[in-house]
Amino acid sequence: MAPITNGRVLFNAVPEDYPVPGKTTVYDTSETIDLENAPLNGGILIKVLLLSIDPYMHGRLRSPEKESYMAPYTLGQPLTGAGIGVTGAHVRGLLLHQEYMIVPNLQAAMLGVIERDPKLDWSVYIGAAGYPGESAYVGWRAYSDGKPGEIAFITTGAGSVGSMAIQLAKKDGLKVIASAGSEDKVKFMKEIGADVAFNYKTTDVREVLAKEGPIDIFWDNVGGDTLDAAMEFAAKNARFIECGQMSGYNSGYQPMKNPALIFEKCMHFHGFLLFELRAKYAEAFQAEVVPRLVSGEFKSSEDITRGLDKVGDVILAVQKGTNTGKAVVRVADE
Amino acid sequence: MAPITNGRVLFNAVPEDYPVPGKTTVYDTSETIDLENAPLNGGILIKVLLLSIDPYMHGRLRSPEKESYMAPYTLGQPLTGAGIGVTGAHVRGLLLHQEYMIVPNLQAAMLGVIERDPKLDWSVYIGAAGYPGESAYVGWRAYSDGKPGEIAFITTGAGSVGSMAIQLAKKDGLKVIASAGSEDKVKFMKEIGADVAFNYKTTDVREVLAKEGPIDIFWDNVGGDTLDAAMEFAAKNARFIECGQMSGYNSGYQPMKNPALIFEKCMHFHGFLLFELRAKYAEAFQAEVVPRLVSGEFKSSEDITRGLDKVGDVILAVQKGTNTGKAVVRVADE
């Protein structure tokens, strides 16, 4: 068989604010691969099927001098991100944003073999049943201390993390206020059980919280003014779970207006990163969440775009919030 | 016996920034009391001996429209604050800032009878063995999770709360960095065990933390730029104990510069107020701290001013940090 194109998405230029498809990242077709004769050197050839596009990726599209909690992408090299590939069995982990990749072995590449429940698409395994779902689970179980009747306010409630947080909070018997940026998303949040769902672009967050709060738990995926508002309407002893601050990824983080509220209201803030806590909660997640996704008790929503060349567009859509549901790029069919 | 003057310190005017003695508060001698014939109506006469002057008092010298976590003082009425009085037995609790007061009974006034160890002055019982010491104890035990070899940075380390926090951290085997605002205070912090003690007015906090950090625990009594610096030099999974934010009491609270560090570094913030947690730790405090004050293993320092008419000056000194050690006003001898 003749060599075929091995498409890749390369980091091309540090963006000024929002990532620009075709400039920040470029789809590159200059490499080829001979699938039958590629030198494996004892390694394994993986065909990339699905790639997860996540908000945090913007933070990796930066210049290497700038320090942050995750390593920057390398200019001229393919992006990496959560994904599912196939090499005989299906594997999941951090994959290159290219059509085919060769790894020395699964263990060294930290790729795990996974099986699929026939009722769930593979895409769910990088969404609600994957890292985003696990993020919500770990943060909620480790830090919410949620009790029946308490009130939780969950931001980006239609996203893959937020929607799982909503469903966990409802399962634990809490009243849930949830926000997102479109009417479609509001509809989805109501479908999955949010008691109060609103579009933060058209409804004032402080009005909602004044009426429906005070809040005992805040799931923060956005930061900025929403975080300030949540602090203003926090109950005493409120728990704030800091999962991310989307509002700052493109235009820079905003300060917290009144940190003195932390002691005045005896508040607790918990920042977390999935990979610090994942092992501890992995088994419980498999037992508590995955069967509920299979049975349909928990719902997930994916927004699947076909084609590796669309990665740049989807990265931008995720930053702008124009996708509805977990953003996934389908690189190839089985 | 003829009636005598019953001096009082009244809240007279809301301060613009720093409280002004004689304006914000006035010493008033217009009331008299006949100690032998005052109508008790079944109540108890208390002679006030010692009053604690604390940083939080500034927050109570405000107009009643302004909401905050503690009730405002009432214009034209005496201040109240922690103190020790005598009515046969010695009692401790919130006392009026006046020489004599009548309460219906001890329970209704939430005053507790206390005994003194002969080795400790009564003033210690509103300092290291009183609310400030308890504040440090409760915050440290509930939220520090301090482990031997970890690094704690403690602000206002020469004050009654900070100095107890330093000694608890050292007892738990941590390395302690401590800051305060004068060379005398630096000397005292070294005496009580701080490994690194510095004057924040003459030494750059970031230089100290870059050399001696990163820090695992931050005891925050100051907020503002010091809090920002502590976050910059925090280790992963750092615990920030939010006890107060002195820097904001007079000029307004400053924002937190980069709240995204909370999730990037998996940080934990815990705000607390003594009276929320006091009952839970009261017995342990008596067992762990008071005997060490008696034996001299733990040290305390009081800055005692004689005369109820000096309350306004001491309130200002506490806000400006010009006192050294726990600020106490001695209203009367036994």
Image (cartoon, coloured by chain):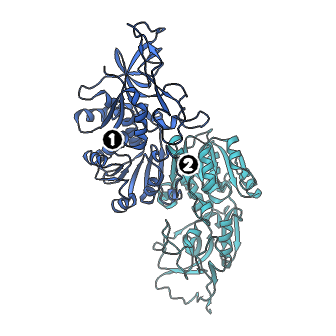
Chain colours: A blue, B cyan
- Quarter of the picture containing the C terminus of chain A is top left
In the picture shown, does residue A55 fall above or below B136?
A: above
Mark 2 to mark 1 CA distance (whole Å): 29 Å
The answer to whether residue A165 is left or right of residue B208 is left
Please name whichever residue, B86 or A41, is drawn nearer the observer in this view of the structure. A41
Q: Amino acid at mark 2?
A: Asn
The answer to whether residue A95 is left or right of residue B293 is left
The answer to whether residue B184 is left or right of residue A280 is right
- Quarter of the picture containing the N terminus of chain A is top left
Query: On the image, numbered disc 2 is attached to which residue?
Result: B258
> What's the mark number on residue A324?
1
Q: Residues within 10 Å of mark 1 (few under 14, many from 20)?
A: many
Please name whichever residue, B190 or B252, is drawn nearer the observer in this view of the structure. B252
Question: SS for tag 1?
Answer: loop
Please name whichever residue, A5 or B126, is drawn nearer the observer in this view of the structure. A5
Q: Quadrant of residue B92?
A: bottom right
Measured from the top left, where is residue B189 in percent x and y? Answer: 71, 52
Residue at 58 percent of width and 55 percent of height = B136
Q: Quadrant of residue B126?
A: bottom right
Can residue A333 be seen in the rendering of this structure?
Answer: yes
Chain of the residue that carries numbered disc 1 in the rendered image: A
Chain of the residue that carries numbered disc 2 in the rendered image: B
Measured from the top left, where is residue B289 in percent x and y? Answer: 60, 54
Measured from the top left, where is residue B299 in percent x and y? Answer: 68, 55
Residue at 54 percent of width and 41 percent of height = A16
Q: Amino acid at mark 1?
A: Thr
> What's the mark number on residue B93?
none
Question: SS for tag 2?
Answer: loop
In the picture shown, does residue B285 fall above or below A244?
A: below
Can residue B88 be seen in the rendering of this structure?
Answer: no
